[in-house]
């Protein structure tokens, strides 16, 4: 192309108009240029970049592909091609394009950052971290590289490192709203509500239409951790008020990108308060569905498929971010894959997880179709719609952002949730909630926005673990000390301060004993729990250090080894543990639990009812203390409990009755 030629002048003018944000005029000039030279790579490239900015991803991909075809070694074109492929839901091809760009220009910071983001989307998070570090080696002032490295640290549970990265990014670009927002998310997760709210407020000062910060401000009213004198009623009232603010803001604005905020932050911690949450979650769920409505309107309504004969199989879709060695998979989902009658059901799996392991491969081998790593929200919606499921089941709604986005859409005639997160979803798009006879109290249907379905027994078919316990050696914690060993296995946010008295009272009545707590991935929350327990013990004239210890989170073999040495398992009150209680039964370790008012507080007690040990279920905190003290001090009673546990343990494993009942229920829905 000759400098000063009409074509060169058009391209120069188009670039200037693009830089000024006048896209329409830039496109007019580019069209004139393309009439002179149809395959000009520079004109096609810029036209494709503008198309991508305007949301026309098909046109963007077509134009940039022409540029790459005619200048295959141009790094800028390859980087833009990767961007277009990513927007089109083709992340593997995008990854390859970015890698080619870096091969041709090893110091290409933007391509390194884009490659890192793509690898993160594909679940290759450690590789992604390397890309961001390489980008920072090339340009220590890259705001995007600092920001995305912080996001990786957060996803890997390194909160302190994430905060440092975000703060470094803000030193370079003090008004970057994405960084302020992400810093707020980390601070909320660390239990610093006030700091999180300050970040969200700063975002909204800079950009009042930043939807995720609006949602984050509401959710942040529910802290991840409560101090010794904190009142959850105040937090609930603040959450309710902020829901009203969010409802008003959503009602005043019809935003096409509102769906991007759904799932950005979730009221996860409300479940750890022992109150009825249906009303608040119904309002939150309605907001989610309303925000997704622009996308919903682009989708044809799912049709009930007429079954041509009784022999036609029901198409069952399972949408989950936990199709790997995860507690939700082990407790609930694996039994479906193993025992559903495949002559009656097709099994179509949509694995949203960013990781795979041997369990994922096992699930893949038992599926009629298995979808994983296919891109963003739009690509998942298309994949689910294309499979035409008769029924969609979400094993968990409330922990994973993409799951919540999908569940807020109507993608199947019948949509079902179950107790992977044991709380009502509040979503009007979810029709039924699968629970269990042994878990639910009388009148439990009032706790759900969905129609409650009680499957027999524990509502699931879980297998006994083949784990061999490990004791001693470097993987076992040092829990040496006088007195009985009491296992306290809950995450720090499961322990509410108004129940701390059970520990001080048990310590006072037993004398020397050892409460063993576990350091969570969110280490800051564990440190705060330890500090609160120290306060609670000091108020009773006791020193927590004489009674309690925090040890590293253990892998299953070492955890089993510790439980086989222990005297008692103390279940968390108000939000019980299922998988940990099952493991205690496997190890023959007596359990003390207190029956909760809701499903989430009745998981361990359901297990004990199933194995005919209901007499070890407390009805109050006081009775919880009495049972714990008796089990430790009355050796004959403890021996009797262990013997009865051994005799009844088989009742909780490989129970296909819930699966058979699920099959009958699904067939009744299909008609």
Image (tube, rainbow, N blue to C red):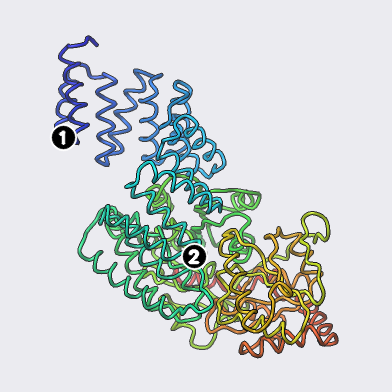
Q: Residue at x 80, y 60 (%)?
A: 468
Q: Position of residue 642 (x, y in %)?
A: 81, 79
Q: Residue at x 38, y 20 (%)?
A: 74
Q: Position of residue 113 (x, y in %)?
A: 44, 36
Relative to 338, is 62 above or below? above
> Would you identify the image quadrant in which residue 607 lies?
bottom right
Q: Residue lying furthest top in this view?
A: 2
Count numbered badges in the picture.
2
Q: Which residue is more in the foreground, 393 or 102?
A: 102
Circle number at residue 359: none
Q: Position of residue 543 (x, y in %)?
A: 69, 76
From the image, which quarter does the C terminus lie in?
A: bottom left
Q: Earlier in the sequence, mark 1 or mark 2?
A: 1
> Would you identify the image quadrant in which residue 98 lies?
top left
Mark 2 residue crowding within 10 angstroms, few (<14) / some (14–19) / many (20+):
many
* Residue that badge 2 annotates: 191
Q: Secondary structure at mark 1?
A: helix
Q: Residue at x 30, y 61 (%)?
A: 291
Q: Is residue 302 left or right of residue 329?
A: left
């Amino acid at each position: 192309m000759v400098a000063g030629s009409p074509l060169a002048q058009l391209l120069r003018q188009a670039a200037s108009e693009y830089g000024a944000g006048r896209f329409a005029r830039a496109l007019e000039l580019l069209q004139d240029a393309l009439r002179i030279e149809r395959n000009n790579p520079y004109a096609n490239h810029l036209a494709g970049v503008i198309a991508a900015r305007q949301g026309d991803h098909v046109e963007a991909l077509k134009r940039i592909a022409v540029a790459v075809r005619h200048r295959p070694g141009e790094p800028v074109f390859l980087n833009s091609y990767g961007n277009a492929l990513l927007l089109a839901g083709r992340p593997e091809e995008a990854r390859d394009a970015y890698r080619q760009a870096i091969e041709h220009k090893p110091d290409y910071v933007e391509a390194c950052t884009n490659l890192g983001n793509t690898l993160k989307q594909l679940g290759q998070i450690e590789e992604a971290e390397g890309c961001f570090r390489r980008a920072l080696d090339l340009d220590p002032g890259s705001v995007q590289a600092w920001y995305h490295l912080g996001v990786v640290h957060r996803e890997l549970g390194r909160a302190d490192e994430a905060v440092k990265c975000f703060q470094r990014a803000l030193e370079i670009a003090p008004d970057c709203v994405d960084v302020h927002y992400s810093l707020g998310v980390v601070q909320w997760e660390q239990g610093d509500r006030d700091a999180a709210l300050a970040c969200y407020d700063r975002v909204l000062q800079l950009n009042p239409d930043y939807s995720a910060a609006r949602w984050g401000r509401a959710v942040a009213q529910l802290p991840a951790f409560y101090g010794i004198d904190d009142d959850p009623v105040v937090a609930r009232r603040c959450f309710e008020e902020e829901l009203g603010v969010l409802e008003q803001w959503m009602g005043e604005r019809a935003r096409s990108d509102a769906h991007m905020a759904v799932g950005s932050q979730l009221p996860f911690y409300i479940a750890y308060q022992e109150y009825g949450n249906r009303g608040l979650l119904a309002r939150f769920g309605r907001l989610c569905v309303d925000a997704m409505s622009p996308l919903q309107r682009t989708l044809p309504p799912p049709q009930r498929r007429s079954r041509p004969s009784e022999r036609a199989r029901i198409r069952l879709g399972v949408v989950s971010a936990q199709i790997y060695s995860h507690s939700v998979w082990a407790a609930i989902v694996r039994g479906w894959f193993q025992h559903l009658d495949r002559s009656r059901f097709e099994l179509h799996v949509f694995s949203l997880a960013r990781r795979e392991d041997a369990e994922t491969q096992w699930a893949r081998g038992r599926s009629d179709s298995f979808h994983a790593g296919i891109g963003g929200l739009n690509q998942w919606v298309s994949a689910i719609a294309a499979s035409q499921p008769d029924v969609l089941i979400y094993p968990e709604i409330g922990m994973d952002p993409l799951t919540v986005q999908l569940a807020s859409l109507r993608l199947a005639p019948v949509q079902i949730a179950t107790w992977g997160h044991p709380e009502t979803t509040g979503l009007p798009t979810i029709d039924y909630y699968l629970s269990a006879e042994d878990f639910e109290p009388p009148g439990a249907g009032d706790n759900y926005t969905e129609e409650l379905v009680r499957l027999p027994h524990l509502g699931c078919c879980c297998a006994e673990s083949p784990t061999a316990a490990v004791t001693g050696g470097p993987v076992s914690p040092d829990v040496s000390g006088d007195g009985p060993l009491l296992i306290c296995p809950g995450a720090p946010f499961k322990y509410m301060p108004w129940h701390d008295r059970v520990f001080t009272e048990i310590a006072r009545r037993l004398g020397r004993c050892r409460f063993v707590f576990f350091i969570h991935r969110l280490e800051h929350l564990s440190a705060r729990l330890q500090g609160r327990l120290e306060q609670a013990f000091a108020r009773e004239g006791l020193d927590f250090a004489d009674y309690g210890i925090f040890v590293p989170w253990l892998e299953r073999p070492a955890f089993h080894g510790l439980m086989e040495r222990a005297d008692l398992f103390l279940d968390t009150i108000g939000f019980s543990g299922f998988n940990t209680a099952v493991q205690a039964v496997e190890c023959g370790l007596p359990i003390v639990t207190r029956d909760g008012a809701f499903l989430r507080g009745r998981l361990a007690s359901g297990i004990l009812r199933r194995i005919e040990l209901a007499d070890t279920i407390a009805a109050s905190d006081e009775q919880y203390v009495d049972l714990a003290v008796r089990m430790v001090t009355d050796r004959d009673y403890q021996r009797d409990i262990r013997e009865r546990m051994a005799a009844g343990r088989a009742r909780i494993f490989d129970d296909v009755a819930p699966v058979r009942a699920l099959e009958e229920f699904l067939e009744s829905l299909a008609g």
